Image (cartoon, rainbow, N blue to C red):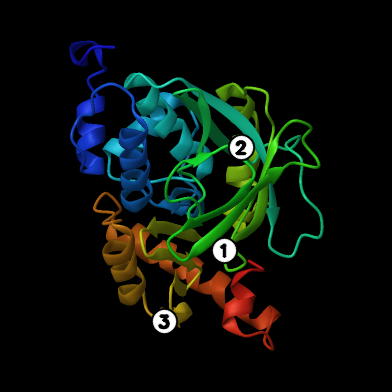
């Protein structure tokens, strides 16, 4: 695909990532795009918390990026997949089952809360995922073994619940235990069918608590409720954000979410909801250290 044939949204998308327009698909370019995506486009569920109607439509996912927002896994990887396809990469979407912290068994991809991507370059298949929040910093070649991205360590194994698929085990300090990837291609409408549940059901983790995450070369930042956590080479540190000012400052300074489009009234309503949920969560687990409580939200 020539530069002139690219959709008009590609240039502002690349500008949001802070990268120059790449040439033909290469592994170096893919790595640069992946790093920029997870650094600058945070995993975030703020619209879900505010009751704003969203979708996982490809055009809507790209529009969110151009508007300065992030999204949850399906939105982020839908947008990234669209960008990579427009740049000439061969991209395939896959359903993946997420094994949350505390879950005793892997989850197959029958229930589809996660979209992940693969692409092929120079005869190798690569796992591409910009929607894990505190997950991969770069693409991972689909080959069994350990993977180190800065201080976070992952392991890629054959999946025991998705025949022919792969299991990516997260660093023990991460937000999930693992994901199991179904090898068959998945269409976007498969995730559209699940989106209303994920975005509105009180049983959905995206609804139960606000979550914002971002990767960088030296670690990951995770905001759950009113607790901001940093994972890096020094270990894991946490601090509570007790006021609306501190909370919104962290969104802007740590995650790049200025939220200029949200009115003061809606900002106050969002903060009140987040703070109330946070206090209820703390009351439900008063004897657990904050570090441990984070994995139960």
Q: Is residue 72 visible?
A: yes
Q: Nearer the viewer, residue 89 or 27?
A: 27
Q: Position of residue 131 (x, y in %)?
A: 49, 45
**Image quarter (top left, top right, bottom left or bottom right) of the N terminus:** top left
Q: Nearer the viewer, residue 277 or 211?
A: 211
Tell whether 46 sits left or right of 109. Answer: left
Crowd tier of the residue under label 3, counting other residues whose Cα lies within 10 Å: few below 14, some 14–19, many 20 or above: few
Residue, disc 3: 242
Crowd tier of the residue under label 1, counting other residues whose Cα lies within 10 Å: few below 14, some 14–19, many 20 or above: many
Q: Residue at x 45, y 59 (%)?
A: 212
Crowd tier of the residue under label 2, counting other residues whose Cα lies within 10 Å: few below 14, some 14–19, many 20 or above: some
Q: Is residue 54 visible?
A: no
Q: Nearer the viewer, residue 8 or 116?
A: 116
Residue, disc 1: 174
> Which corner quadrant of the image does residue 258 belong to?
bottom left
Q: Residue at x 62, y 22 (%)?
A: 185
Q: CA distance from mark 2 to mark 1?
A: 26 Å
Among numbered discs 3 and 1, the one appearing first in the sequence: 1
């Amino acid at each position: 695909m020539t530069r002139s044939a690219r959709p008009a949204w590609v240039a502002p998308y690349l500008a949001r990532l802070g990268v120059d327009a790449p040439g033909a698909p290469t592994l170096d370019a893919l790595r640069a795009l992946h790093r920029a995506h997870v650094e600058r486009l945070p995993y975030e569920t703020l619209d879900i918390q505010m009751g704003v109607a969203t979708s996982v439509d490809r055009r809507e996912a790209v529009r969110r990026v151009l508007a300065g927002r992030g999204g949850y896994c399906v939105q982020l990887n839908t947008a990234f997949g669209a960008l990579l396809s427009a740049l000439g990469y061969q991209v395939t979407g896959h359903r993946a089952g997420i094994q949350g912290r505390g879950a005793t068994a892997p989850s197959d991809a029958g229930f589809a809360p996660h979209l992940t991507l693969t692409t092929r370059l120079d005869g190798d298949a690569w796992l591409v995922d910009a929607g894990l929040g505190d997950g991969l910093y770069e693409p991972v070649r689909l080959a069994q073994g350990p993977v180190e991205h800065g201080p976070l360590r992952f392991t890629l194994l054959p999946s025991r619940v998705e025949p022919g698929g792969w299991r990516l085990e997260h660093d023990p300090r991460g937000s999930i235990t693992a994901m199991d990837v179904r090898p068959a291609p998945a269409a976007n409408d498969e995730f559209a069918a699940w989106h209303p549940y994920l975005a509105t059901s009180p049983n959905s983790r995206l609804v139960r608590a606000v979550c914002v995450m971002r990767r960088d070369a030296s670690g990951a930042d995770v905001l759950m409720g009113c607790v901001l956590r940093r994972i890096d080479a020094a270990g894991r540190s946490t601090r509570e954000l007790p006021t609306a000012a501190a909370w919104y400052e962290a969104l802007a300074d740590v995650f790049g979410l200025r939220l200029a489009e949200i009115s003061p009234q809606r900002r106050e309503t969002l903060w009140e909801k987040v703070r109330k949920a946070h206090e209820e969560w703390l009351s439900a687990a008063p004897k657990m250290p904050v570090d441990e409580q984070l994995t139960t939200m």
